[in-house]
Amino acid sequence: MNMVDAFYLMNYVDDQFKVNAQLTEEHERIANEFLKDIKKFDDKTFNKLLVSATFIPDFYEPDSSRETLFSKLVEAMVTEWAIRMGYEAAMQKEKASYEDVRIAIKDKLIVVDAKTFRLGRSQAAPNVKDFLKLEDIRKWCSRYKNAIGGLVTYPCLHEWKNKSDAYTYCSTKDMPTVMLSYKHLAFLLDNKENFNTEKLIELWDYENIFPEKLPKNLKGGNKKPYWDAINKKLIEITNVGDKEYVKCLNRYDKIINQAVKEIINFLETIIINKKEEVAREIRKLSDKQIREAYEEYKISQETEEYQRILENVKAFRL
C-alpha cells in the first residue's frame, strides 16, 4: 500500500493550515471541498482510504482546530460512501446536538454518528459514553418524520474484547442503532453490484434481528452475539457466501495492519529526528549552559504539579 493512503487525510488537513493557520470558521467549507476532491478516486482506492486513513493523528491537540477539521473530513468520507452506495446523503451543518451525517435509503432516514479515534489512546476501546448515547440518537431521529434509527461508524481497531454496554445499546429495538466499522462499509461498497443496495435498510429490522437486547452479563459476553447477528444479516442482504464475506474483511484487516505499521514507522522516525536534534543542540552548549538548562528543567519537573494546584487554589478559592 502506498504510504499516501494512511496519511491522506492528515496531509490534507496540514496543507489547509499551511495556507491559513486560523481555520476555526472554515471547517465546513473545507470539508465540502474535500468531498468533491475524493470523488476522483475509484471505489477500490476510496475503500483503502476509508479503512486506513481515518485515525486521528495522535499529536493533534484534543479539541484543537486540526482535530475538528480531521473529524469533519471523516464525516465527508462517510457521506461519500453513502453516495457511492446510491443513497442520498448530506453532512450536518449544525454541530451542537445534531447528527454528523444524514443518509436516506428509499424513503427512510438514518442519522449517523461518524467516529474516529487515536491509535495511541491508552485504552483498547473508547469509553461507551464517548461512543454512543442512545438518547442522542432518539433526539436526532425525533427531528425527522421518516427517521427509523441510527448508525455509528468507527475504526475497527477500537472495539471491546468480549462485552460492553455498547452492544446492549446497539441491540435495543425501540431505537435501532447499528454499529459498523469502516471495513464493513468498505465491504458493502465492494459488493454493491451484487445486491439491491436499498435492501440495506433491512439492517434496522431489529424486531427480527434483535427481538431482545443483548445484556452485558451474557455468558461469554455480548460482543459475539451482536456480530453473529449483524454478520448473518449482511451476508443475507449482499448475497455473498460466508467464505467470501470473511475473505473480504480479512483483506481490509491486512490493509489496516499495513497502515498501522506505516504510522509506527512515521512516529519512530520523528523520535529519531527529535533525539538527533536535541543532541546537536546540546553539543553546541557550554558546560555552564548545560547545568543552567538542566537546573531549569529539574525545577520545572519537581514543581509543576504544585504550581498547577497553587494556580487553581488562587483562581477558584480566594
Image (cartoon, rainbow, N blue to C red):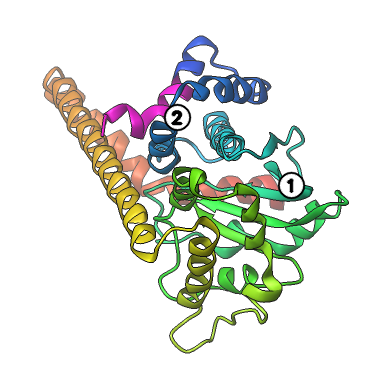
Residue 9, disc = 2
The extreme top residue here reads: 19
Of the numbered discs 2 and 1, the one sitting upstream in the chain is 2
Question: Going 76% across and 62% down the picture, which residue do you hit?
Answer: 135
Magenta span of residues:
1-14
Q: Is residue 76 magenta?
A: no
Question: Going 27% across and 30% down the picture, which residue do you hit?
Answer: 3
The percent position of residue 311, horizontal first and vertical second, equals 58, 45
- Residue type pointed to by label 2: Leu
Per the model, the C-alpha gap separating discs 2 and 1 is: 31 Å
Figure check: 277 above or below 214: above
What residue is disc 1 on?
A: 106
Q: Is mark 1 on a helix, strand or loop?
A: loop
- Residue type pointed to by label 1: Lys
Figure check: 31 above or below 20: below
Q: Quadrant of the N terminus?
A: top left
* Picture quadrant of residue 28: top right
